[in-house]
């Protein structure tokens, strides 16, 4: 997906009702819905016809460097290779994006070996969705964290209940960053939207807090809840 990004959707799935499902189009569709300039590439003409009304999609083989060049891939600040079913296609597409000089390349890997290959050929960010899901579930089942997103290299954002010693105090009074090394970036009161946190923001017992930091620091912070 180009535009924000370049994305070649993953292999289609045929549901029992006959509807075609393409697992990579969801991200492109979400970004397009947010008003981002998005362009997805798909080499299967049937899938192009199926998805073209919902996603900015062109018929092109992203494993062909000439096709990517003609799409103007190098003019997009971010490119995403979401191919997971074919190691060869994934490596070819990522390598093509590297050769074109894409500023920021995100690529999906299906194994740690696959991830190492993508990193070695020049992908800036490599995701392992199945491993990430397992890690997220492991954190959530403890009950301490209500939301968990690992951004990169152990840097994580979580939603959780505030530790006991922070309740009734402002963030500045609790000196959370000094004591735990994490940063409270938002506070959500019951029935209200989250608000950006400042040192003057007071945390109540029924609030939820959105906190960023290293995974091990957040685990320690959450254990106090």
Image (spheres, grey):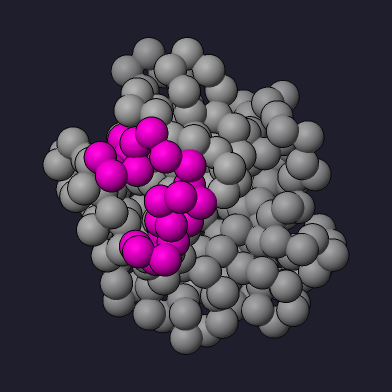
- Residue 206 sits above or below residue 119 on the image: above
Instruction: Tell whether 132 sits left or right of 79.
Output: left
The percent position of residue 170, horizontal first and vertical second, equals 48, 42
Front position in the image: 80 or 215 = 215
Residue at left 74%, top 79%? 101
Residue at left 19%, top 50%? 223
Residue at left 70%, top 61%? 78
Front position in the image: 81 or 146 = 146
Q: Is residue 60 in sight in this rendering?
A: no
- Residue 92 sits above or below residue 53 on the image: below
- Is residue 178 covered in magenta? yes
The percent position of residue 68, horizontal first and vertical second, equals 74, 64
Q: Which residues are magenta?
A: 160-183
Residue at left 46%, top 76%? 118
- Residue 34 sits above or below residue 213 on the image: above
Quadrant of the frame with the C terminus:
top left
């Amino acid at each position: 997906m180009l535009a924000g990004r370049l994305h070649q959707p993953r292999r289609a799935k045929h549901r029992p009702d006959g509807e075609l499902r393409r697992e990579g189009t969801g991200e492109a569709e979400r970004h397009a819905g947010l008003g981002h300039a998005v362009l997805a590439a798909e080499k299967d003409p049937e899938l192009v016809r199926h998805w073209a009304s919902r996603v900015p999609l062109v018929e092109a083989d992203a494993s062909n460097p000439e096709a990517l060049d003609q799409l103007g891939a190098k003019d997009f600040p971010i490119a995403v290779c979401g191919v997971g079913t074919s190691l060869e296609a994934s490596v070819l597409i990522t390598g093509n994006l590297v050769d074109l000089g894409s500023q920021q390349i995100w690529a999906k890997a299906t194994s740690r070996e696959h991830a190492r290959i993508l990193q070695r050929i020049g992908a800036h960010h490599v995701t392992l969705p199945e491993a990430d899901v397992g890690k997220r579930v492991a954190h959530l089942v403890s009950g301490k964290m209500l939301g968990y997103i690992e951004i990169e290299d152990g840097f994580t954002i979580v939603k959780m209940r505030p530790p006991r010693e922070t309740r009734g105090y402002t963030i500045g009074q609790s000196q959370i960053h000094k004591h735990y090394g994490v940063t409270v970036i938002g506070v959500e009161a019951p029935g209200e939207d989250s608000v950006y946190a400042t040192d003057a923001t007071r945390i109540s017992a029924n609030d939820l807090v959105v906190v960023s930091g290293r995974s091990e620091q957040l685990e320690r912070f959450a254990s106090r809840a």
